Image: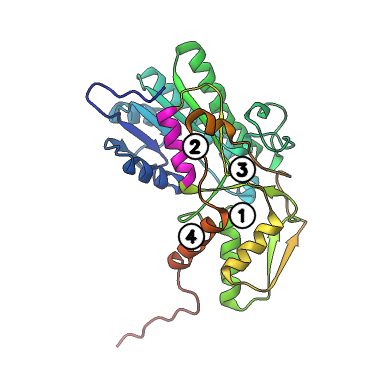
Amino acid sequence: MPLSSPPHGQPRLLVTGGSGFLGRQVLAVLNEHGYQHVVAPSHAEYDLTNADQVSACIRDLRPEVIVHLAAVVGGIGANQARPGDFFYQNLVMGAGLMEQARTNGVQKFVAIGTICAYPKFTPVPFREDELWSGYPEETNAPYGLAKKMLLVQAQAYRQQYGFDAIYLLPTNLYGPGDNFDPATSHVIPALIRKCLEAVDNGESQVTVWGTGQPTREFLYVRDCAEGIVAAMERYDGAEPVNLGSGEELRIADLARIIAEVCGFRGDIRFDPSQPDGQPRRKLDTSRAHDAFGWHSTTSFREGLQATVDWYRAARPPSGPMYTRATP
């Protein structure tokens, strides 16, 4: 069933997390699809962990569709350092926003989950029916479980109230505009930064967390944004839907590909004292294709090159910095 529009035309859309990595791409896709009534307030305008501010957000902006992207996110290190923050803030944001959406007549709620919601030893490829077959990988379980509660809430609200909430499960994202902060970045931007800095500094090796043996699946952020908008427009089912590329890549191979694209020709060392995270990740993406006709279109090499090119242009200049003498 396509997304219905109110009598006066296009729906008013609220995109939470619109200034974030994925949010900026979703806003761009919405704009290209011709949506004119889109609001994406900042955290400073409405703190979605505060119930009163969530209520004010819905009251002030009167959205008819909500795409909930706002989240507290980070890599393994950040998840280990702040598990309480990652659990509580993600849980309360999603639960409060969906409840206010329901009670204020919002037509549709698009909830964005995470691949971290899957059990640690999910059979590969991950199928949506396996979401409840075990406990998530321990290093990011609080985050994964908090986001999975959005699925529970969406299905419960659909059953009791007839509320149209859908739940999407993107795999690991990457692309231009990603977070390259070494304290909170995910694996691709972290490795790009390490390799480029090693080239700049003439270093002979870079170190990668873990053994290098786990596998991951990566989805170009623009492809993910297009999948979210396609689901918003054409999907209204109760079942969760994976968004991924369907390609599995070993971390060791990932590191070597990134080194090659960055022009780093030194050694890649692995640090097995650091956690590996989930052993394998690869999604079955057939439901997205069957339900709303979406599949990823950007090859990993193409997306990686675009990401490296963007970071090269965006990062601060390398080398020593000098202060100009006062005349």
User: On the image, numbered disc 4 is attached to which residue?
Assistant: 306
Disc 2 to disc 3: CB gap under 8 Å: no
User: On the image, numbered disc 1 is attached to which residue?
Assistant: 187
Q: Secondary structure at mark 2?
A: loop
The coloring applied to the image is rainbow
> In the image, is 289 to the left or to the right of 58?
right
**Residue furthest left as drawn:** 8
Residue 52, image x, y percentages: 38, 28
Residue 296, image x, y percentages: 52, 44
Helix, strand or loop for the magenta stretch, by majority: helix
Answer yes or no: is residue 97 visible: no
Marks 2 and 3 sit apart, C-alpha to C-alpha, by 12 Å
Placement of the N terminus among the 4 image quadrants: top left
Q: Amino acid at mark 4?
A: Ala
Marks 3 and 4 sit apart, C-alpha to C-alpha, by 20 Å
Q: Amino acid at mark 3?
A: Gly
Marks 4 and 1 sit apart, C-alpha to C-alpha, by 16 Å
Residue 215, image x, y percentages: 70, 49
* Above or below, 183 relative to 167: below
Stretch in magenta: 223-234
Q: Secondary structure at mark 4?
A: helix
Residue 120, image x, y percentages: 72, 37
Marks 2 and 1 sit apart, C-alpha to C-alpha, by 26 Å
User: 10 Å neighbourhood of mark 3: few (<14), some, or many (≥20)?
Assistant: many
Q: Earlier in the sequence, mark 4 or mark 1?
A: 1
Q: Earlier in the sequence, mark 3 or mark 4?
A: 3
> In the image, is 14 to the left or to the right of 309?
left
